[in-house]
């Protein structure tokens, strides 16, 4: 491993009309160093005006998301010695830049409000009892740390104006739909407001997930299948129409 590494950071301050531009910094390296360490070194020893969002530095909070060498990653989980002698760092491209590496991800909270919440079946006896197998089905979805890397890499969100919820929120919908005590059918919501048809299952979201959640395989594809069965399958259409008449 080289004694130094060049960190090239895309900087900007929209509030001051500063256009995006890359600034190079030479940072001394040490064993076990991660990209977030290098960014902290720059802020502490070279340029204290550099802005970056972070919290736990343990890949648990999802705060330090960025694009490292062109790929969405957690900076606290990305080893410097695996990235080469020159490392580029950019803010997530799917969201507006607040300053430097800090982006405004508040849009996700607005999307979350659109999702029909957990609604238990009426007259369920208490205490609620759930079989272990039903807990296991959606267990991986609850490991999401809301880093929004899957949202960032999604080309539908990046490049198209659509109402697609995005992979992170598809995980939430799938977890609700798999809950054995939930009573809501969200298929119609996904078909219209959720924009699930815009996803073409490239699995790019699944590939960047730091928690290894099978977003496409276990969340998006099953939800797309439900929509197809209800709105495009001839028998499903008849069933759907009959439900609407009741």
Image (spheres, grey):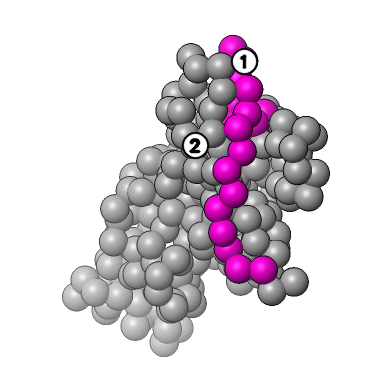
Observer-nearest of 115 and 93: 93
The residue under the point 62% across, 15% down is 30
Magenta residue check for 29: yes
| Residue 228 in which image quadrant | bottom left
Mark 1 closeness class: few <14, some 14–19, many ≥20 residues within 10 Å: some
Give the residue at mark 2.
Answer: 87
Observer-nearest of 242 and 72: 72
The answer to whether 65 appears left or right of 133 in the picture is right
The answer to whether 145 appears left or right of 219 in the picture is right
SS at badge 1? loop
SS at badge 2? strand
Q: Is residue 33 visible?
A: no
The answer to the question of whether label 1 and label 2 lie on touching residues, with beta carbons closer than 8 A, is: no
Mark 2 closeness class: few <14, some 14–19, many ≥20 residues within 10 Å: some
N-terminal-most mark, 1 or 2: 1
Marks 1 and 2, how far apart in space?
15 Å
User: Is 172 located above or below residue 55 in the figure?
Assistant: below
| Residue 16 in which image quadrant | bottom right
Q: Where's the C terminus, which quadrant?
A: bottom left
The residue under the point 21% across, 71% down is 233
Observer-nearest of 133 and 188: 188
Q: Residue furthest left?
A: 234
Residue 233 shows which numbered tag?
A: none
Residue 30 shows which numbered tag?
A: 1
Where residue 40 appears, as percent x and y from the top left, is 72, 34
Where residue 45 appears, as percent x and y from the top left, is 78, 33
Magenta residue check for 167: no
Residues in magenta?
Answer: 18-38
The residue under the point 49% across, 21% down is 81
């Amino acid at each position: 491993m080289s004694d130094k590494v060049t960190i090239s950071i895309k900087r900007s301050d929209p509030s001051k009309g500063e256009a995006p531009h890359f600034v190079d910094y030479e940072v001394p390296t040490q064993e076990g160093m991660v990209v977030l360490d290098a960014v902290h070194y720059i802020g502490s020893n070279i340029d204290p005006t550099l802005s970056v969002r972070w919290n736990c530095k343990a890949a648990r909070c999802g705060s330090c998301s960025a694009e490292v060498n062109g790929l969405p990653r957690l900076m606290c989980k990305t080893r410097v010695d695996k990235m080469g002698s020159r490392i580029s760092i950019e803010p997530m491209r799917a969201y507006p830049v607040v300053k430097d590496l800090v982006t405004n991800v508040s849009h996700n909270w607005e999307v979350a409000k659109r999702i029909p919440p957990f609604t238990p079946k009426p007259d369920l006896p208490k205490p609620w009892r759930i079989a272990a197998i039903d807990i296991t089905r959606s267990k991986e979805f609850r490991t999401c740390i809301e880093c929004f890397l899957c949202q960032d890499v999604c080309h539908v969100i990046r490049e198209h104006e659509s109402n697609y919820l995005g992979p992170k929120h598809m995980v939430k919908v799938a977890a609700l739909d798999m809950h054995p005590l939930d009573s809501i059918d969200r298929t119609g919501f996904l078909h219209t407001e959720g924009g699930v048809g815009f996803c073409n299952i490239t699995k790019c979201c699944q590939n960047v997930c730091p928690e290894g959640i099978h977003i496409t395989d276990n969340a998006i594809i099953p939800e797309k299948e439900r929509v197809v069965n209800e709105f495009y399958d001839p028998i499903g259409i008849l069933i759907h129409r009959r439900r609407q008449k009741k």
